[in-house]
Amino acid sequence: MKSKGSRFERDLIAELWKAGLAAIRVAGSGVSSFPCPDIVAGNGRVYLAIEVKMRKDLPLYLSNDEVEKLVSFADDFGAEAYVALKLPRKKWKFFPVRMLERTEKNFKIDDSIYPLGLDIEEVAGKFFQDRLGEKI
């Protein structure tokens, strides 16, 4: 399962680079005693701390601890905290932490939240730039 997760992380890194964001996998994410996301990405205007998830179907549940560590790193680093979710035969969707639904014990992304997820171009800031008439 770990190698499958690494493959999805590498796939997302390639997509982030194509979207104009420099991106790297964080060594030790998930096992470090320090809070660290799976991927850190940025382009000088936008900085992202990303927790990567893939699922066959929804809902996706995230523990309080997982979300708190992601937010803690993002705040300390000056980045925005996102959960990137890949479903089969779908493009990556990005969810700012504030978009996650709070449950009694966890956070979740379900069928009501999934359609609200952002596309990679939105998190890269391209739509904002296009509206201003600037070239990326």
Image (tube, grey):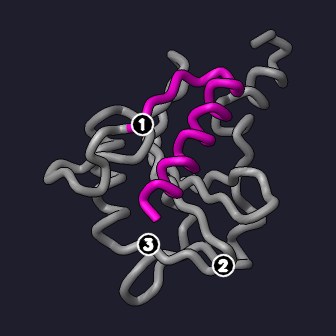
Asked if the magenta segment contains residue 37, the reply would be: no
Please tell me whether the stretch drawn in magenta is mainly helix, strand or loop.
helix
- The answer to which of 122 and 14 lies nearer the viewer is 14
Q: Provide the secondary structure element on which disc 2 rests.
A: loop
| Separation of marks 3 and 2 at Cα, in angstroms | 12 Å
Residue 26: percent from the left, percent from the top?
35, 38
Specify the amino acid type for callout 3.
Leu
Residue in view at x 85 percent, y 14 percent: 133
Decide: few, some or many residues near mark 2? Use Cα within 10 Å; few <14, some 14-19, many ≥20: few
Figure quadrant of residue 75: top left
Q: Provide the secondary structure element on which disc 3 rests.
A: strand
Decide: few, some or many residues near mark 3? Use Cα within 10 Å; few <14, some 14-19, many ≥20: some
Residue in view at x 23 percent, y 56 percent: 31
- Which region of the structure is painted magenta? 1-25
Disc 1 marks which residue?
Answer: 25
Q: Are marks 3 and 2 in contact (CB under 8 Å)?
A: no
Disc 3 marks which residue?
Answer: 62
Residue 119: percent from the left, percent from the top?
74, 45
Q: Is residue 125 above or below residue 91?
A: above
- The answer to which of 24 and 105 lies nearer the viewer is 24
| Separation of marks 3 and 1 at Cα, in angstroms | 20 Å
Residue in view at x 68 percent, y 77 percent: 57
